[in-house]
Amino acid sequence: MPPDTVSLRYFLVLAQELNFTRAAARIGIAQPALSARIRRLEAELGTALLVRTTRSVALTTAGAALAESAPPALAALDRAWDTARSAGAGQLGTLRIGYSLSAGAGTAPALVDRLIRDNSGLQVGAVPMATPEISPAVADGRIDAGITRGEQPGRGVRRLLLRRTRIGVQLAQHHPLAEHPEIEIADAAAYPLRLPDRAANPVIHDQLSALFQGTRPHPRFRTPAVSFDLSQHDLRDGLTLAPAGEAAATTQPAGLTWRPLRDAPGLTFHLVLPRDPSPLHRRIRAAARTLAHELHWLPA
């Protein structure tokens, strides 16, 4: 069995001083206690480390070898302890963040970048996922955190409001409504409205469609055949509108624009974490709160 590290550290002080009185004073213990520690260490190793006389203390061959080899071994052990403590405090390891594609523009990259900058020992990976899969994946530990658009249902998780954005519509720049800085909900409802597939995100689909309930004539909803069509062919026809959050204003393809809907409620983005957070999860939450404040994602 390896010797205990306390006795080994005491021996190294004694090997430098070669005097029990001075070594005990440096360590801060009584001389008899130091003598007992060294005898125990020699018994564990099965060999003498010191030659003691009434006037002097000298290292044996074994003692000299131990005094030379022990410091790097103890330094490596100290690094191992520090590594374990850092990992336990959430400062090391691999962090997996799942995000929905609709929440990916700006939100997920900003959080990943913040976590990497503030935690050099963390490896952060972000993977796109279907929105309904994110909360269950956080709950069962397949991912460490998730970012969703809307407050998605799910057990075993906690949700932190991360961002709130205005709701508006994407439309062609030559569309008649594009002339207005804000669009009335009833005016938008007079045109075909493209909504995301409900299976992909029931919460957001229902929230967007509810905006137009009660308008006359009844709104005509469409679901695109291809999800996340970057060319936005169905909007370029100059008729169809696509209800969307404010983030769409910064990612517009050529020929399209975004206008807010007057008096519409905001869209929300949530950070999803396990119900029982670890130090790593608390670190993610702290970074997310700081980021939301700095980027003014939430009202002051």
Image: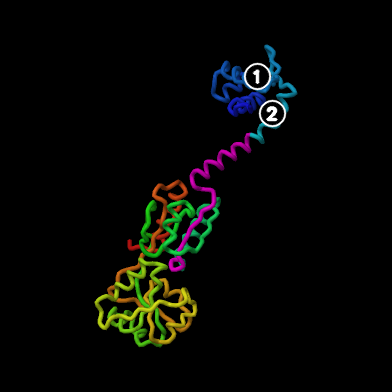
* 78 in magenta: yes
Q: Dot 1: what SS?
A: helix
Q: Which residue is mark 2?
A: 67
Q: Dot 2: what SS?
A: helix
Q: Please identify the dominant SS of the magenta region.
A: helix
Name the residue rendered at 58%, 17% in the picture: 31
Name the residue rendered at 29%, 72% in the picture: 210
Along the line of sight, the residue nearer the viewer: 63 or 140: 140
- Image side of residue 281 versus residue 93, left or right: left
- Asked where in the image residue 153 lies, by quadrant, the reply is bottom left
Of the residues under marks 1 and 2, which one precedes in the sequence? 1
- Residue 159 location (% of width, % of height): 37, 56
- Residue 186 location (% of width, % of height): 27, 80
Q: Is residue 29 above or below residue 224?
A: above
- Residue 247 location (% of width, % of height): 42, 71
Amino acid tagged 1: Ala
Query: How many numbered dots are placed on residues in this image?
Result: 2
* 280 in magenta: no
Tag nearer the camera, 1 or 2: 1
Badge 1 local density, few (<14 within 10 Å), some, or many (20+)? few
Along the line of sight, the residue nearer the viewer: 102 or 3: 102
Q: Which residue is mark 1?
A: 43
Badge 2 local density, few (<14 within 10 Å), some, or many (20+)? many
Colour scheme of this structure image? Answer: rainbow
Given the current orientation, which residue lies at the most extreme right position? 61
Amino acid tagged 2: Ala
Q: Using the numbered discs, state the Cα–Cα distance from disc 1 to disc 2 in whole angstroms.
A: 17 Å
The magenta segment: 74-103
